[in-house]
Image (spheres, grey):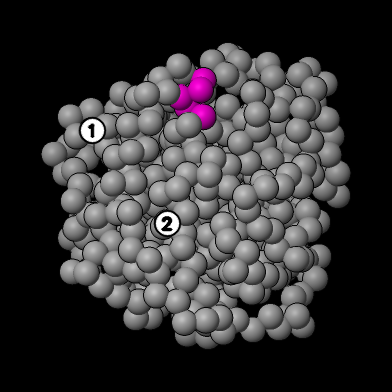
Amino acid sequence: MLGAPSFHGFFADPRAMYEKPLLIAAASALLWACSTEAVAPRPGPGDTEGGSSPPDAKIADGDAPSEGGGSGGTGVDGTSIPRVDGGNRFPFPQNSREARCTYAAGADAEHVRQTYLAWKNELVTASGAGGHLRVRRPNSPGGETNSTVSEGIAYGMMLAVVMDDPDLFDALWKYSQLWLDANGLMHWYINAAGTATLGTGAATDSDEDMAWALVMASRKWGGSGTLTSTYLETARAQIDRIWQFEVDHTRGDLLLAGDSWGSNIIFNPSYFAPNEYRVFGQVTGKVDEWNRVIDTGYAVIAKSLNATSGNATNGLVPAWCDVDGVPKPPSAGGATNYQYDSARMPFRIGQDYCFYGEPRAASYLAAISGFFATIGAANIVDGYDLDGRPHPDPATPAGSPQSAVFLGGAAVGAMHDAKYRVLLDDAYMRVATGQLLARSRYYNLSWTALSLAMLTGNLYDYPQ
């Protein structure tokens, strides 16, 4: 079990006037889409936006057609267009409420719709997508301008299934299939022109999020859409590849960082998505096997929170660590502090608690929520040393706004206990402005929409 958090009270400032209309956010996103920004390459195999950032892709001037062959999607005004082939069992908005979790006082599905439109209008493009669609990254530090990473395709598929956008969903999956490695998993980094792989090998977080989205598409729409196999068959095949190539069966079924790390055994806590593995067990019949992945992952996380690292009670997991929880850079110069990867951890674990009531999740969330509640939502920065000292990301320009992934993650973590309502409510309203875009518009626009979908009860594991 994790140690009890040291809690000294809340200092959050609700600042109701801080909220800005989401229509303004969407309009600013459209304006931004007309400009290009330079970015630099992202180091480290299988690394994600956090440790070293991916490049940004750009929408081709007004060019975001839906792929032919399917009926359904989301209109330009955000209205749902139902798919006719398989129906729609869980149309947006669902506004589902898990009894064990708390929801923000200002939770509103309209915030989700507006931030989704801002995300889609700015980041989804047909340019360089091989006849399909992809997600671009306009200003992420560390990569080629307008390139795509597999992580972005996965985020897009998750959002598309939530937002009743089957044509986008299918087109993103088809794009991923243009860039498969020898194991049948998407290479993590593709150039903007769609002519070259810039980073080889798969990233586990992307692969598992795609698989989860495929299962949800099956439960929501049924059938196959415009794919050649059903969503469920496609999901099972993807899950089997993850099981075969991205789980270490010699180390208690440890989740690996990707399929091409060889003898470099390393664990990224923010890749750990236990609610998804419960779904994988359901659809493949490998419940015991995926439960071992869950047990091993929670054990590594518990080991990573210790007196030596100074994080025994604050929940600040390292970006990367070994099987004993010792911080370990993924490559020379790689980050191990609580950064843009790690900030997803409360979100991942918050899902496992809200959906399944996992006690290990509750223990972790008590620690991280106590830490952020003491700081207050207004003061959360985009990086911390493991002992809790602020360590803002060096690639974030001075004077930048806050980061949606840090505040959104903190808000989702706070859902587990009503005593963190001040943190939850304030963080929610800040994310709902659509303006917390420090460092990377791609990454923070994605996490704005994902966080709000979760915080409003619209991102959840659809029942079978």
**Residue 459 appearing in the image:** yes
Quarter occupied by residue 432:
bottom right
Q: Quadrant of the N terminus?
A: bottom left
Say if mark 2 contacts mark 1, CB within 8 Å: no
From the top left corner, tell me how far across and down residue 372 is, in percent.
49, 73
Does the magenta run of residues contain 281?
yes
Q: Position of residue 95 (x, y in %)?
A: 76, 47
Question: Quarter holding the C terminus?
Answer: top right
Looking at the picture, which amino acid does disc 2 mark? Ser
Residue closest to the eye, 168 or 323: 323
Of marks 2 and 1, which one's residue comes earlier in the chain?
Answer: 1
- Residue bearing mark 2: 363
Expressed as whole percent of the image width and height from the top left, the position of residue 70 reads 74, 23
Q: Which residue is mark 1?
A: 252
Drawn side of residue 366 relative to residue 61, left or right: left
Relative side of 217 to 207, left or right: right
